[in-house]
Image (cartoon, rainbow, N blue to C red):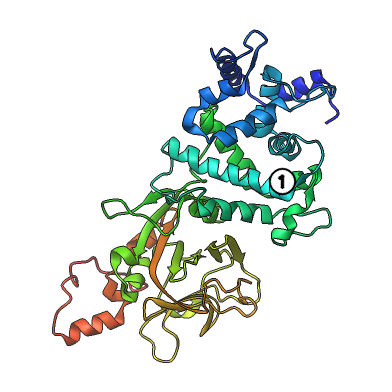
C-alpha cells in the first residue's frame, strides 16, 4: 500500500475504537502466552496456539488460512518471506483489515489466505477459498448454536449447498476483460489483486462471511456483529422439530435479497408436509399475511421459488410490485429480478371458469415463470428463452413438473391490517370449500362467532 511500518501502525490504530483495540490486544496476549506456543518471549503466536485457542469453533482448514494470512503480511516491504509466527502488529493489522478495512485492505489479507505465492492466483484457488469460507460460516454458527431454528442437512463431505453458494459467489467475479464466470474452463484463469478487490467490493457476502468467521470463531468483538439480518429467526407454530426444504445457507442467500426491514424473521404459513396437499389450504393460509417467500422442490430435486413483496390476494388480476423476484436454490443458486417488460409479478386465483386457477409469478397466463396449479402437486416453469417478467430460465428440471414439498414463509412483521384480514376463515377465500359445505347441509359454525368485518374487507 506504499505505507511505512509506522504509518501502517497509525492507520490500523485508527480503525478500532479504544475499547475494541483493548479487546484485540487482550486476545493477542492470550494467544501469545499459550503454553503450547513455541515463541512466547518475542510476543508472537504459532499455528498450534491459534488452533488450541479456537478449538472446534472453526474447521482446521480455515484456522490455517487465517494464520497464513496474518503471518504472510509484510508490513515493512522488506521481508524475505513469511514469518514463522504471527507478531502482534501482523495480528492487529490483519484483524483491522478484515473487520474494519475497505475492499483494498481486505484483499491484501485474503490473497495471503489464498496462496503463499506473490502475484495473481487461479480462479480455482479462489473457489476453494470461498468453499472453505462458506463452510466455516455454517460450522461456526452451528457450533455457537446460532442457527435460529434452521438446519444444515447432514451429508458425507462438504454439504452440496456449500459448493453451490461458493460457485454462485465466484460467478459474480469479473476478469480484466469484463467477462464473468463461464464454467469449469474458467477456473484456470488468473485473478490479480484488482480482480479480487473488485469482487470483494461488489459481493458483500465475502466480507460479511469473513466477519462472522472471525467474530464467532475466535471469538472477539462479538457485540459489534449483528446476525439478525443475516440469519432470520425461524418461527414454526406447530410443536416439534420442522425441517424446511431450505437449509441455513439457502435461507441466508434468499434473505440477503429481501428488503432489509423484512430480514429478521421468517414465519411458516404453509407447508404441504404439515397442512396437506391442498390448494384451498394454501390460499387460506397465505392470503393477507404480508410479504412471503414461497419455495418448492420438484420430483427431480430442483429447489426454487419466489418472493412476493406484497400480500397475496385471491383475485383475477395480476398483483405485486418491482420488489418481487424469482430464485433458484438447487442445483444452482440465483436470483432473478424484474425486467420492466410487464407488471405480471404475482397472480393468485381460485374458483374461476374462464381464467387459470392457481398461483403464478412472472410471464403470462398459461406461460408462467413459476406456476402452482389448483390441482395441487403440479406446476410449470415456462421460459423460452427466459421469463419476460423476471428474465429467469426454466427453474424446474422439466417444464411441467410435479412436487410433494412446498412451503410459504411470511417475512418480517405483518401490519395490523394484515393481521386483521388473516383472521378470516379459509371459507372466505375458498368459494369451492364453502359451496361443498353448503351442499352437504352443514353450517358454517364459525359464522357469527367472529367479529364483523368492514365492508372493505
Residue drawn at (54%, 71%) of the image: 395
Q: Is residue 301 at least partly visible in the picture?
A: yes
Q: Is residue 143 above or below residue 389?
A: above
Q: Residue at x 29, y 69 (%)?
A: 276
Please provide percent x and percent y for residue 85.
67, 20
Q: Does 297 sit left or right of 381 as displayed?
A: left
| Camera-side residue of 48 and 451 | 48
User: What count of labels does the image hold?
Assistant: 1
Q: Nearer the viewer, residue 78 or 362?
A: 78
Q: Is residue 423 visible?
A: no
Residue 117: percent from the left, percent from the top?
A: 78, 36
Q: What is the residue that sits farthest to the bottom in this orientation? A: 354
Residue 56 position in % (x across, y down):
47, 31
Q: Is residue 15 above or below residue 440?
A: above
x and y percentages locating residue 359 in the rendered image: 44, 76
In the picture, the quarter occupied by the C terminus is bottom left
Q: Quadrant of residue 97?
A: top right
SS at mark 1? helix
Quick one: which residue is furthest to the front in this view? Answer: 156
Q: Which residue is mark 1?
A: 201
In the picture provided, is 99 more to the left or to the right than 194? left
| Crowd tier of the residue under label 1, counting other residues whose Cα lies within 10 Å: few below 14, some 14–19, many 20 or above | some
Who is closer to the viewer here, 416 or 33? 33
The N terminus sits in image quarter: top right
Query: Where 223 falls versus 451 (above or below)?
Result: above
Furthest-top residue in this view = 41
Amino acid at each position: 500500500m506504499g505505507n511505512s511500518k509506522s504509518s501502517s501502525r497509525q492507520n490500523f490504530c485508527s480503525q478500532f475504537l479504544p475499547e475494541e483495540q483493548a479487546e484485540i490486544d487482550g486476545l493477542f496476549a492470550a494467544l501469545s502466552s499459550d503454553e503450547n506456543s513455541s515463541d512466547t518471549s518475542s510476543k508472537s503466536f504459532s499455528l498450534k496456539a491459534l488452533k488450541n485457542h479456537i478449538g472446534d469453533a472453526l474447521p482446521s482448514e480455515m484456522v490455517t488460512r487465517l494464520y497464513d494470512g496474518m503471518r504472510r503480511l509484510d508490513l515493512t516491504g522488506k521481508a524475505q518471506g513469511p514469518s514463522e509466527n504471527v507478531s502482534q502488529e501482523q495480528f492487529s493489522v490483519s484483524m483491522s483489515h478484515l473487520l474494519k478495512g475497505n475492499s483494498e485492505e481486505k484483499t491484501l489479507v485474503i490473497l495471503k489466505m489464498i496462496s503463499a505465492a506473490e502475484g495473481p492466483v487461479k480462479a480455482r484457488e479462489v473457489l476453494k477459498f470461498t468453499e472453505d469460507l462458506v463452510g466455516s460460516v455454517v460450522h461456526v454458527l452451528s457450533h455457537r448454536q446460532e442457527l435460529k431454528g434452521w438446519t444444515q442437512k447432514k451429508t458425507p463431505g462438504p454439504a452440496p449447498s456449500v459448493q453451490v453458494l461458493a460457485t454462485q459467489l465466484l460467478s459474480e467475479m469479473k476478469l480484466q476483460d469484463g467477462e464473468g464466470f463461464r464454467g469449469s474452463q474458467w477456473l484456470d484463469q488468473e485473478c490479480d489483486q484488482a480482480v479480487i478487490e473488485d469482487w470483494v467490493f461488489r459481493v458483500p457476502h465475502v466480507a460479511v462471511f469473513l466477519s462472522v468467521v472471525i467474530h464467532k470463531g475466535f471469538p472477539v468483538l462479538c457485540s459489534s456483529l449483528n446476525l439478525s439480518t443475516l440469519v432470520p429467526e425461524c418461527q414454526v407454530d406447530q410443536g416439534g422439530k420442522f425441517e424446511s426444504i431450505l437449509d441455513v445457507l439457502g435461507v441466508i442467500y434468499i434473505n440477503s435479497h429481501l428488503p432489509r426491514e423484512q430480514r429478521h424473521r421468517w414465519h411458516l404459513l404453509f407447508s404441504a408436509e404439515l397442512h396437506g396437499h391442498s390448494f384451498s389450504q394454501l390460499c387460506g393460509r397465505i392470503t393477507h399475511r404480508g410479504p412471503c417467500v414461497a419455495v418448492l422442490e420438484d420430483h427431480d430435486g430442483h429447489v426454487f421459488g419466489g418472493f412476493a413483496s406484497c400480500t397475496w390476494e385471491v383475485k383475477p388480476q395480476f398483483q405485486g410490485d418491482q420488489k418481487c423476484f424469482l430464485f433458484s436454490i438447487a442445483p444452482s443458486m440465483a436470483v432473478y429480478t424484474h425486467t420492466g417488460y410487464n407488471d405480471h409479478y404475482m397472480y393468485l386465483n381460485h374458483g374461476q371458469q374462464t381464467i387459470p386457477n392457481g398461483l403464478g409469478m412472472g410471464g403470462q397466463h398459461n406461460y408462467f415463470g413459476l406456476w402452482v396449479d389448483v390441482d395441487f402437486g403440479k406446476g410449470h416453469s415456462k421460459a423460452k428463452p427466459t421469463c419476460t417478467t423476471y428474465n429467469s430460465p426454466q427453474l424446474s428440471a422439466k417444464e411441467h413438473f410435479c412436487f410433494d414439498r412446498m412451503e410459504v414463509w411470511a417475512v418480517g412483521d405483518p401490519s395490523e391490517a394484515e393481521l386483521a384480514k388473516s383472521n378470516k376463515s379459509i371459507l372466505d377465500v375458498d368459494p369451492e370449500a364453502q359451496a361443498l359445505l353448503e351442499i352437504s347441509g352443514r353450517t358454517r359454525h364459525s359464522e357469527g362467532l367472529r367479529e364483523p368485518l368492514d365492508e372493505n374487507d
